[in-house]
Amino acid sequence: MTAQNTLDKDVASRYLVAEHFQMVSSVKIFEFSKLTTPAAQMLIRHQGDLDLSGLQELGPATARILASHIYPLNLSGLTRISPATAEALATHKNILNLNGLKQLSEKTAKILAKHNHDIFLSGLNTLTTKTAQELAKTKGDLLLRGLSTMSEDVAEALSKHKGILYLGGFKKMALPVAQKLAKHNGGMGLRGLEELPPDVAQALAKLKFGLHLGGLKTISPDSAKAIATHSQGLHLGGLTSVSDEVAVALAGHQADLHLGGLTHLSPVALKALVAHKGRLFLGGLANQPQSVLDQFDKHDGEVILYPVPDREYGF
């Protein structure tokens, strides 16, 4: 079946019948590029995420129907939407995936900001300051993983957002941008960062909510000391090894610390992390000798020694 077909009422009916009888459906609704209004009226009965990622066009009337679906809605195949369609989708009350949008006007951003749940806009690779100001008003988490750079003004605008801000497209971050983003009143996902200079670490450590830096493969002692001053949950699950100096520095962190990528600890690193104040995620050590794992009985807090899924969204 190709993405040139139209998902009509008959196809929707077959899909829902299979669901009702708990059968594996041969209908893959995400493969259709067009959707009729009667089919949309049927599909909103689906009990779960509605994946219509193949749709390449969506009018306001059909969008209004889909917006009444109470579960997450995936419309990531849309590369553009009209203000009227955006107005309809903004009434949706669950996760809205619009990762296919390549451009977003200030007007459309203002409309989508009325959406009261998480919104995925990771197809955008640039934002104007005014568009960023509008998107910052959304009340749910905001996913903008397509951005790999931004101006200080855009960073300042996005810092006004209240919720988790996902900027996983950044491989490195300029200090002025980090300083602006550090004012953000919510968690931040920076899983794409591949380097963390000490001054940027010091700036990001001022964030008042959780910070995901799971893309880092290495970290210097100075950067570890700086980021360890962060007062909330810190995700460094991409580290597969740490020096004793880094382990000692990170052990000074006093909140949830995710180091699930570590598979071995030296005696010095082990002693340091045992003294850590806060919850520890060390699932990569699960195969270590029991004598090593028993050392964490001395830890003043919960230690998770089984693998935990490394997911940025919802951390």
Image: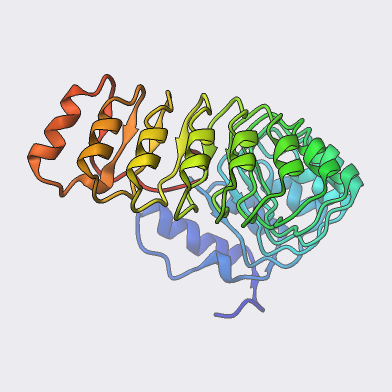
Residue beneath the point at 30% across and 32% down:
273
Q: Nearer the viewer, residue 130 or 29?
A: 130
Residue beneath the point at 29% across and 31% down:
272
Residue 111 in sight: no
Residue 193 in sight: yes
Quarter-of-image position of residue 100:
bottom right
In the picture, measured across the screen, residue 212 lies left or right of residue 120, that is left
Q: How is the image coloured?
A: rainbow
Quarter-of-image position of residue 202:
top right
Which residue is situated farthest in the top direction here?
Answer: 300
Q: Position of residue 22 (x, y in %)?
A: 35, 54
Q: Is residue 41 above or below residue 5?
A: above
Q: Position of residue 150 (x, y in %)?
A: 78, 51
Q: Position of residue 200 (x, y in %)?
A: 64, 42
Q: Nearer the viewer, residue 300 or 23?
A: 300
In the picture, measured across the screen, residue 185 lies left or right of residue 189, that is right
Residue beneath the point at 67% across and 27% down:
185
In the picture, measured across the screen, residue 146 lies left or right of residue 21, that is right
Q: Is residue 87 above or below residue 6?
A: above
Q: Is residue 232 above or below residue 35?
A: above
Q: Nearer the viewer, residue 3 or 146?
A: 146
Q: Name the quadrant of the N terminus.
A: bottom right
